[in-house]
Image: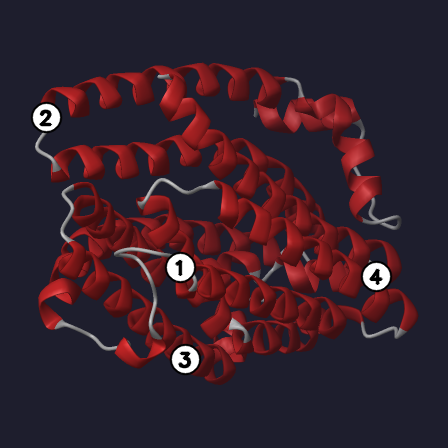
Amino acid sequence: MDKLISFSLPLMLSGILQLMFNAVDIIVVGQFTGSQALAAVGSTTALIAVFTNLFIGISLGANVLAARFYASGKYKEMSETVHTSITLALISGIIMAFVGLLFSKVALEIMSTPDNVIDQSTLYMRIYFLGMPFFMLYNYGAAILRAVGDTKRPLIFLIISGLANAGLNLLLVIVFDMGVAGVAIGTVVSQFISCVLVLRCLHHSEGSYQLRFSKLTIKSFYLKQIFQVGVPAGIQSTVINLSNALLQSSVNSFGSTAMAGYTAANNIFGFLYISVNSITQSCMSFTSQNYGVRKTKRMDKILIDCIILRLHLGVAHTSLEMNCYDYIPVIQRLFSAGLKYLPIQQCRISAAD
């Protein structure tokens, strides 16, 4: 249990920090550009998740396969898994960049995005997707590091890139008055920084997970195994985010003010989800390593420990959600100075209905 917690905490902090830096994007654009810009950025979140989560799910397959080979001491298999995974990340990132550039506006129109925000939303998405190769390379590289038991260095890389993102947001939005374009550019630059840091880390590592750019290739044998684990996880995540996109589409029909409020709420509830998800990722890494050395009894114990941890977190989350209404005005003022909100009593009645 102690090892599981110590492994999960950096993962949890990484997720929380990522959401905090994403929240900084929303807060800066909401406070200094207005609620329409806040709605424009927020309306893209579910759509971006639909586009990207299949490939993010596949990175879980890379994590599982790498952990299995690393634990069993299979140097050659581990090395080829690393190079196949990084090559796959680069290819999928380039594909997603073109998809985002070509289909952003069409997808936003399908989601009934209001006319007064759709141009800003399209601009944000197109710039954001230019950084997709960096985003994918970081996620797959971090998955490899987690597979060998290293969750601290991805956390450090995320802190560095996140601080750069926050600084660029303030500079580009406040000083240069670039609005949603400034936020998107800051995000792309921060993704580039995190990508360079994780690739540099893998390149300078010793042992089976060392990255050599001259060896980048796709081995069909390992690609098939990555897909066997990752594609079902990716499809599951995509379906969940598709339902979120449909919900976002419904919110869009109420106009930009409702979209801005929904964006603010979603950012807060994301913090609750990420802590539970970190336990899941830890469970996969630990289980894969023990599967690699055929320690099935330890796998059963890991499953029980993970269930216990998730139950404790679930109780804590339920308590927080039940008491969140008192802070609605504060949250909404934080995200946008001009955002209107319902009285607390009316929010409670609506929630009860």
Q: N-terminal of the two: label 3 or label 2?
A: 3
How far apart in space, not on screen, are marks 3 and 2 (Cα)? Answer: 39 Å
Residue toward you, 151 or 124: 151
State the residue at coordinates (54%, 78%).
130
Q: N-terminal of the two: label 2 or label 4?
A: 4
User: Tag 2: Cα neighbours inside 10 Å, few (<14), some, or many (≥20)?
Assistant: few
Q: Which residue is disc 3 drawn over?
A: 94
Q: Residue type at mark 1?
A: Gly
Q: Which residue is disc 4 drawn over?
A: 170
Q: Which residue is disc 2 drawn over?
A: 296
Residue toward you, 241 or 200: 200
User: Tag 4: Cα neighbours inside 10 Å, few (<14), some, or many (≥20)?
Assistant: many
Locate the C terminus by quadrant. Answer: top right
Q: N-terminal of the two: label 4 or label 3?
A: 3
Locate the N terminus by quadrant. Answer: top left
For marks 3 and 2, give the one nearer the viewer. Answer: 2
